[in-house]
Image: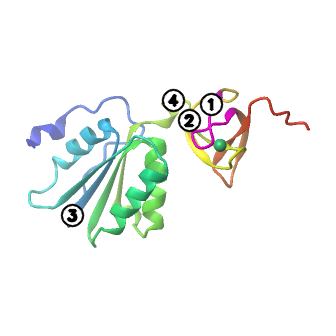
């Protein structure tokens, strides 16, 4: 990877500043989506030669499969690793929470958002039918299908703190009953 790649202009206007790559014994680059892979390579072009880099390509979404894979990757890390989390902001935030839960300190995590959540009406929705949460591109009042139970939901303006998600009510359900 030629060093010139480190100076590639980064697409879009990231809300998060382009991070510096801190020194590390090794790097784990978890890339959620294809754009994320390119961003990670641009960042890793600044790494010292000889430092081991593990690359993991994940889907640009957050679900049980991606979370399980991330947990497996982080659990296999050794001391001195820096964990690079690249992807859509909503995914990176969830991934950061998992990394912290598994014992990674803030210094050990390098978050890179490929797209700011504010640029898209992407929000977390809590399905009132099956009581599972999922990410959806949906405005308040819009209809989305629950990917878990396939219920058709209307995204409600009410936000559930415990679930960190907007309520999705099965469409047609009378909330006043
Ligand atoms: Zn559901």
Residue 25 placement: quadrant: bottom left
Residue 129 within the segment the image draws in magenta:
no
* Mark 2 secondary-structure assignment: strand
How many numbered discs? 4
* Dot 4 or dot 1, earlier in sequence: 4
* Dot 4 or dot 3, earlier in sequence: 3
Name the residue nearer the viewer: 7 or 98. 98
Task: Give the image location of residue 53, x and y in percent.
Answer: 19, 57
Q: Residue shown at 68%/55% (left/top)?
A: 162
- In the picture of the structure, the residue carrying the numbered disc 4 is 120
Q: Residue shown at 91%/38% (left/top)?
A: 177
Q: Are marks 1 and 2 in contact (CB under 8 Å)?
A: yes
- In the picture of the structure, the residue carrying the numbered disc 1 is 144
* Dot 1 or dot 3, earlier in sequence: 3
Name the residue nearer the viewer: 177 or 29. 177
In the displayed structure, 122 sits above or below 77; it is above
Q: Over which residues does the magenta segment extend?
A: 143-154
In the displayed structure, 120 sits above or below 73; it is above
Q: CA distance from mark 3 to mark 2?
A: 34 Å
- In the picture of the structure, the residue carrying the numbered disc 3 is 26
Drawn side of residue 176 relative to residue 36, left or right: right
Residue 157 placement: quadrant: top right
């Amino acid at each position: 990877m030629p060093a010139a790649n480190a100076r590639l202009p980064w697409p879009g206007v990231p809300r998060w500043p382009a991070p510096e790559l801190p020194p590390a014994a090794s790097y784990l680059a978890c890339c959620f989506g294809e754009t994320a892979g390119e961003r990670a390579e641009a960042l890793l072009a600044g790494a010292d030669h000889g430092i081991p880099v593990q690359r993991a390509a994940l889907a640009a979404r957050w679900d049980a499969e991606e979370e399980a894979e991330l947990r497996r990757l982080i659990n296999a890390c050794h001391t001195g690793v820096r964990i690079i989390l690249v992807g859509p902001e909503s995914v990176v935030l969830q991934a950061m929470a998992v990394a912290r839960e598994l014992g990674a300190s803030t210094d050990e995590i390098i978050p890179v958002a490929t797209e700011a959540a504010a640029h898209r009406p992407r929000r977390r929705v809590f399905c009132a039918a099956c009581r599972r949460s999922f990410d959806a591109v949906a405005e308040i009042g819009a209809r989305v299908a629950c990917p878990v139970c396939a219920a058709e939901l209307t995204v409600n303006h009410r936000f559930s703190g415990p679930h960190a998600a907007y309520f999705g009510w099965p469409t047609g359900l009378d909330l006043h009953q």
